Image: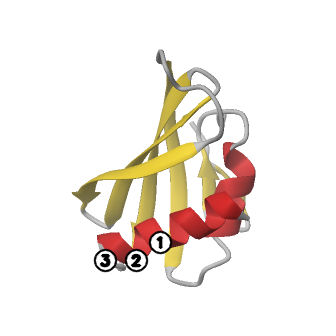
Amino acid sequence: MRLRANQNKLKIEHSIIDGLRPVLERLLLHEEIRSVIPGVIRPVRGARGAVKVRITVPVQNGWKAIALAAGARQELFISTALAQERVEHLIEEALKA
């Protein structure tokens, strides 16, 4: 499957859950974030209301996160050298804007 790029930082292999794309685009405004790759979307109960994103585990080139919204969860792979606390702070800022 060929990757399509937005701003050369948002790699899109799958669709993106409702309301998440603007959050990711705001997150990518920070130079420290090299790229974000959204993963597979799966349905879940209790994922209603505003978009929520939380960091789960470190990966080889950054962090894995889970986004919850619209009755679904989506994995996000965030490529960065930043510490977990800094990435969480940047995500909070992107969610508030």
Q: Earlier in the sequence, mark 1 or mark 3?
A: 3
- SS for dot 3: loop
Label 3 amino acid? Answer: Ala
Residue at (35% x, 79% y) in the render: 81
Give x and y (percent) for residue 15.
66, 33
Residue under circle 1? Answer: 89
Q: Are marks 2 and 1 in contact (CB under 8 Å)?
A: yes
Residue at (70% x, 66% y) in the render: 26
Of 55 and 37, the residue lying toward us: 55
Q: Which mark is residue 83?
A: 3
Q: Are marks 2 and 3 in contact (CB under 8 Å)?
A: yes
> Disc 1 vs disc 3: which is toward the camera?
1
Q: Are marks 1 and 3 in contact (CB under 8 Å)?
A: no
Label 1 amino acid? Answer: His
Does 84 appear above or below 36? below
Does 28 appear above or below 73? below
Give x and y (percent) for residue 21.
71, 48
